[in-house]
Amino acid sequence: STSASCPSSKCKIEAGLKYYVTVRATNKAESQSWFTSDGITVDTTPPFGTTIYIDGGTSTEYVSSNQILDISWGSTTKDYESPIQSYSACLSTAMDTCTLQQAQSVNMATSVNLTVTQRPSDTALYAVVMARNSANLIGTTTSWKLSVDNTPPEAGLVADGEANNDEDCQRLDQPVTASWQGFQDQQSGIEAYYWAIGSKPLWADIQKWTNVGLQTSGTSMLNSTTAGQVVYSSVRAVNKAKLSSEASSDGLRLQSLSTNNVAEFCMAP
């Protein structure tokens, strides 16, 4: 016979140990040769310890349909008995399984871009990562819950001036101030405002879109404007699902430096 087996009652195998098989061949002249295998490690436990990151961190709470998420886990997965052979990942509506799509295999890569399929708002989603070791055991890790938000914030009002008091004109040598109110998002909330100044509504050719956090006003000294020019402040509100809405002021005319009484000589935009 060229094969043999060892019943579990006689061969006591312990997980984590490496075992070798030795075969002795004896010919009719009683000469013998010995052959030993290269060994096999008994592994009864799947990989573990995977830490999932979404878009580079662990703070993402909301996503939107069709959004592309960067799912990564680095070198956090551990297996002390046999090496990792491959990873796969998916987005799912349940923990520890793939309900929306087949798990995407990435071989030994430790990140993958996954697209959120069209789902209703308030749907709960999870990122699921599976690691397979050399014993074909699979360890599954599930992220924290993500909530789908498909609606952008409600746009508010933008004023050329402080405290939402809208001005029509000001001197050219004075800083431009804008304030805004009424932007809101009932589901995921406003994450940040971006403020820009342009020669037309929603343009950013004078001041690029600038993240001002959750401030509701901003002041900027402009250096590339001319007397008589009309500038517009625009605000973009971004919610926690990365959806946005925009609004612009009705314009602010920059008066000549020689104009002392701005209100008297103001030519409203």
Image (cartoon, rainbow, N blue to C red):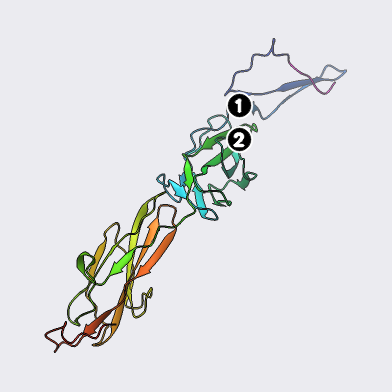
Q: Which residues make up the magenta segment?
A: 1-6
Amino acid, disc 2: Asn
Q: Which residue is mark 2?
A: 133
Category of crowding for the residue at label 1, using alpha-carbon neighbours closer than 10 angstroms: few (below 14), some (14–19), many (at least 20): many
Category of crowding for the residue at label 2, using alpha-carbon neighbours closer than 10 angstroms: few (below 14), some (14–19), many (at least 20): many
Amino acid, disc 1: Asp
Q: Which residue is mark 1?
A: 43
Which is more toward the observer, 127 or 167?
Answer: 167
Residue 212: image location, x then y, percent = 29, 61
| Image mark for residue 94 | none
Side of 180 where 76 appears, left or right: right
**Secondary structure of residue under mark 2:** strand
Q: In the figure, 144 relative to 153: above or below?
A: above
Which residue is located at x 37 percent, y 61 percent? Answer: 237
Quadrant location, the N terminus: top right
Side of 254 where 155 appears, left or right: right
Question: Can I make out residue 74 in this image?
Answer: no
